[in-house]
Image (spheres, rainbow, N blue to C red):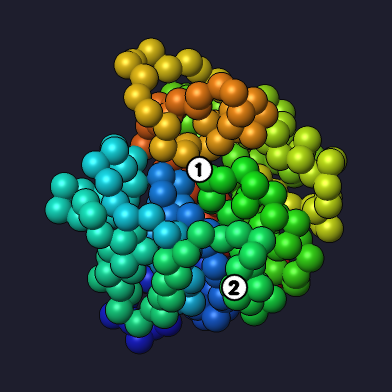
């Protein structure tokens, strides 16, 4: 770690060189690099994680610019995982960043080899795929950390961490629990980042683009046309930073 041009000196000052070496050996897979996942990825790399796999099938679009780390007017149309990988390697050229430009699903879940990772981070949008990822991830040796809904919120002081079954006031968390009770429950406990704040859209509505909350609407009432919900970067970024902190705290605790 000390060979990497001093870029981790401030982290090493706090955590110690031995701990930084342990962090560098950890393998993490992150599903979803949007408003939450992109900030999580950057935080992990800046704190010394060297082995990171990022999974997302989307390309950068103009509406991502207000909240997603790699989204700028110059990156519109490019694959999110490719743009983010380039940025992460500018931070630490020695990092091993693997990209998978696919949607996680039940059909392809085996191709991700989740058992080979130490940590699995869930920051995906689709309720159906999120349920399956949680069911699968909790049956591996890896530690899972999951993001609940980050849309329709403005107050960062209401962002919390809780065990999945204890998440309160979050529509996405409630929808996930209902799905789990109907099907296969998680095999072990896992922590979630969430907020109990729920606001309403005040601007002009526009067509659906699969945000978390609108996915819930589609699942629960297919006859209702879902709408995209407003999202702010100071919320999504803190969700992502908190997910990253859960990984780092767990590594420190275990060592």
- Image position of 95 (left or right of 135): left
Tell me if residue 39 comes above or below residue 3 in the rendering: above
Quick one: label 1, few (<14), some, or many (20+) residues within 10 Å? many
Among the 4 quarters of the image, the one containing residue 26 = bottom right
Q: Secondary structure at mark 1?
A: helix
Question: x, y percentage for residue 187?
Answer: 84, 58
The vertical placement of 155 against 233, above or below, is above
Could you tell me if residue 22 is visible in this image?
Answer: yes
- Total labels drawn: 2
Say which residue appears at 70% left-offset and 69% top-offset: 142
Most foreground residue, 150 or 201:
201
Q: Position of residue 106 (x, y in %)?
A: 66, 61
Of 19 and 196, nearer the camera is 196
Residue 201, x across and y down, in percent: 42, 17
Q: Residue furthest top?
A: 202
Q: Residue at x 41, y 37 (%)?
A: 209
**Which quarter shows the N terminus?**
bottom left
Residue highlighted by disc 1: 239
Q: Quadrant of the C terminus?
A: bottom right
Find numbered disc 2 in the image and state the secondary structure of the residue it sits on. helix
Outermost residue toward the bottom?
A: 3
**Is residue 71 shown left or right of residue 14?**
left
| First in sequence: mark 1 vs mark 2 | 2
Q: In the picture provided, is 79 more to the left or to the right than 108?
A: left
* Disc 2 packing (10 Å; few <14; some 14–19; many ≥20): some
- Residue at x-position 31% and y-position 42%: 64
Q: Within the image, what quadrant is residue 104 found in?
A: bottom right
User: Pointer 2: what residue?
Assistant: 112
Nearest the viewer among 2 and 242 is: 242
């Amino acid at each position: 770690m000390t060979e990497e041009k001093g870029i981790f000196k401030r982290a090493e000052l706090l955590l110690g060189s031995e701990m930084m070496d342990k962090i560098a050996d950890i393998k993490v897979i992150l599903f979803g690099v949007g408003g939450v996942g992109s900030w999580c990825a950057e935080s992990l790399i800046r704190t010394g994680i060297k082995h990171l796999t990022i999974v997302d099938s989307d390309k950068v679009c103009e509406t991502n610019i207000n909240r997603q780390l790699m989204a700028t007017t110059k990156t519109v149309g490019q694959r999110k995982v490719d743009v983010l990988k380039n940025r992460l390697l500018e931070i630490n050229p020695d990092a091993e960043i693997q990209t998978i430009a696919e949607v996680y699903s039940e059909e392809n879940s085996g191709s991700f080899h989740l058992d080979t990772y130490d940590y699995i981070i869930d920051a995906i949008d689709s309720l159906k795929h999120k349920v399956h990822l949680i069911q699968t991830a909790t049956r591996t040796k890896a530690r899972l950390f999951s993001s609940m809904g980050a849309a329709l919120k403005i107050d960062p002081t209401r962002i919390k961490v809780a065990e999945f079954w204890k998440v309160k006031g979050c529509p996405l968390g409630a929808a996930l629990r209902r799905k789990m009770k109907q099907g296969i429950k998680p095999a072990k406990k896992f922590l979630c980042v969430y907020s109990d704040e729920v606001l309403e859209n005040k601007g002009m509505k526009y067509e659906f683009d699969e945000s978390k909350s609108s996915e819930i609407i589609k699942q629960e009432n297919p006859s209702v046309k879902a709408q995209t919900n407003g999202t702010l970067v100071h919320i999504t970024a803190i969700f992502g930073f908190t997910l990253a902190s859960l990984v780092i705290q767990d590594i420190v605790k275990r060592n």
